[in-house]
């Protein structure tokens, strides 16, 4: 799957990807744009999206973590079972998810990216190639 970089300002573009989310089969009513960010550990979304995904305050644990701009407070779901992300028409289980109150842009981090895809980037586009399933060797 090849995606052109998205214009974000005059003479500026970024590797943004529109994705879908679902939890226990219920699809979130919005498809956010996420910045493809290999420097991020995992998926980071704005806290406002937690409710749209069906998470209540009691479902989240508040913790401190380091980000590109220093320390930040994040809210991590206690249980991610049944939470998936849609990329290119296919659903993948989320290995991690955090929500932040002051997140200016949502991030698609390396844990999901590199477990399912090979990522290639150029100055004008990025490409996600599905990793082949590892074949088991017979003894």
Image (cartoon, grey):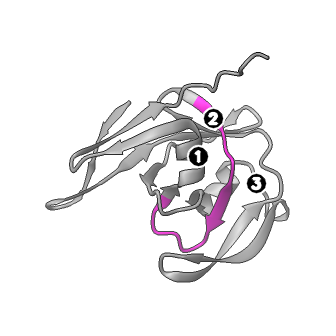
Specify which label sits upstream in the sequence, 1 or 2.
2
Q: CA distance from mark 1 to mark 2?
A: 8 Å
Question: What kind of element bears circle 3?
Answer: loop
Q: Is residue 13 above or below residue 113?
A: below
| 78, 138: nearer the viewer | 138
| Residue contact at pointers 1 and 2, CB within 8 angstroms | yes
- Label 3 CA crowd tier, 10 Å (few <14, some 14–19, many 20+): some
Question: What kind of element bears circle 2?
Answer: strand
Which residue occupies the extreme front position in the image?
139
- Label 2 CA crowd tier, 10 Å (few <14, some 14–19, many 20+): some
Which residue occupies the extreme bottom position in the image?
70
Query: Which residue is tagged 1?
Result: 112
The tag on residue 55 is: 3
| 110, 10: nearer the viewer | 110
Residue 75's x, y, as percent?
A: 71, 68
Q: Is residue 26 above or below residue 6?
A: above
Q: Is residue 36 above or below residue 120?
A: below
Specify which label sits upstream in the sequence, 3 or 1.
3
Disc 2 versus disc 3: nearer the observer: 2
Query: Which residue is tagged 2?
Result: 92
What range of the chain is rendered magenta? 91-106
Question: What kind of element bears circle 1?
Answer: helix
Residue pictured at 57% horizontal, 59% vertical: 45
Q: Is residue 135 above or below residue 73?
A: above
| Residue contact at pointers 2 and 3, CB within 8 angstroms | no
Q: CA distance from mark 3 to mark 1?
A: 20 Å
């Amino acid at each position: 799957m090849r995606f052109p970089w998205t214009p974000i300002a005059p003479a500026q573009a970024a590797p943004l990807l529109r994705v879908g989310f679902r939890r226990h089969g219920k699809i979130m009513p919005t498809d956010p744009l996420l910045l493809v960010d290999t420097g991020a550990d995992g998926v980071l979304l704005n806290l406002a999206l937690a409710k749209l995904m069906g998470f209540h305050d009691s479902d989240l644990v508040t913790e401190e973590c380091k980000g590109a701009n220093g320390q930040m407070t994040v809210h991590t779901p206690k249980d991610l079972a049944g939470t998936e992300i849609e990329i290119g028409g296919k659903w993948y289980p989320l290995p991690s998810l955090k929500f932040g109150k002051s997140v200016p842009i949502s991030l698609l981090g390396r844990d999901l990216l590199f477990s399912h895809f090979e990522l290639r980037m150029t100055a004008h586009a990025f490409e996600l190639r599905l990793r082949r399933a590892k074949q088991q060797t017979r003894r």
